Image (spheres, rainbow, N blue to C red):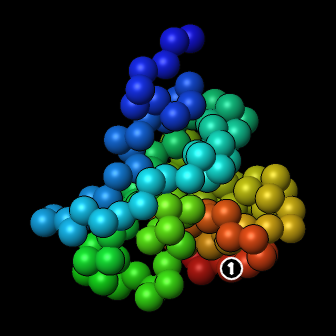
Amino acid sequence: ERKTMGDLTKNFSRSEFKCQGVGCCDKSKEIDIGIVSILQVLRDFFGETVKVTSAIRCDTHNANVGGAKRSKHLAGIACDIVVSNHTPSEVYDFLCYIMRDYGGIIQYKSFVHVDIRATMYRSERA
């Protein structure tokens, strides 16, 4: 398949990861290809759409949504996602399997947060 300049992988484009802030301060980082690669593995495994509900955040948007002061979203290494036709629990379990000893994975009631921090962090907040 031929990719355009906006494509990051066969199923994800750069525009899916941009800051969603209104009046964004436009000082956000680029998305790290490592986190996009994790999402592509999810997409390939489940064979379903992986919707990115939040990825890169600028400082202003992060504060507006109540994000942590040192949120991984600010560094461009985190995404909140929903996988069509699969529960957050199924997504969480698969991510834990493929990211055995690194990265952050948090299961919420309706979505999963995943990041590629060097250390391991796991939490279920259903």
User: In the rendered image, which quarter contains the N terminus?
Assistant: top right
| Residue drawn at x 53%, y 72% as measured from the top left | 72
**Is 112 above or below relative to 94?**
below
**Is 28 located above or below residue 45 in the figure?**
below
The reply, left or right, for residue 32 in relation to residue 74 is right
The extreme bottom residue here reads 69
Residue occupying image coordinates x 49% and y 78%: 71
Image-based side of 101 in relation to 111, left or right: right
Q: Position of residue 52 (x, y in %)?
A: 44, 51
Q: Is residue 46 visible?
A: no
Task: Quadrant for the C terminus, please.
Answer: bottom right
**Residue occupied by mark 1:** 123
Task: In this rendered view, identify the residue nearer to me: 3 or 54.
Answer: 3
Residue 122, image x, y percentages: 73, 77
User: At 59% across and 46% down in the image, what residue appears?
Assistant: 33
Image coordinates of residue 96 in percent, x first then y, are: 79, 62
Relative vertical location of residue 15 with respect to residue 10 in this rendering, above or below: below
Of 124 and 119, the residue lying toward us: 119
Classed neighbour count for the residue bearing mark 1: other residues with Cα under 10 Å, few (<14), some (14–19), many (≥20): few
Task: Identify the residue at image location x=65%, y=43%.
Answer: 37
Which image quadrant is residue 46 in?
top right
Residue 34 visible in the current orientation: yes
At label 1, the amino acid type is Ser
From the viewer's side, name the closer residue of 81 and 109: 81
Q: Locate residue 45: give its quadrant.
A: top right
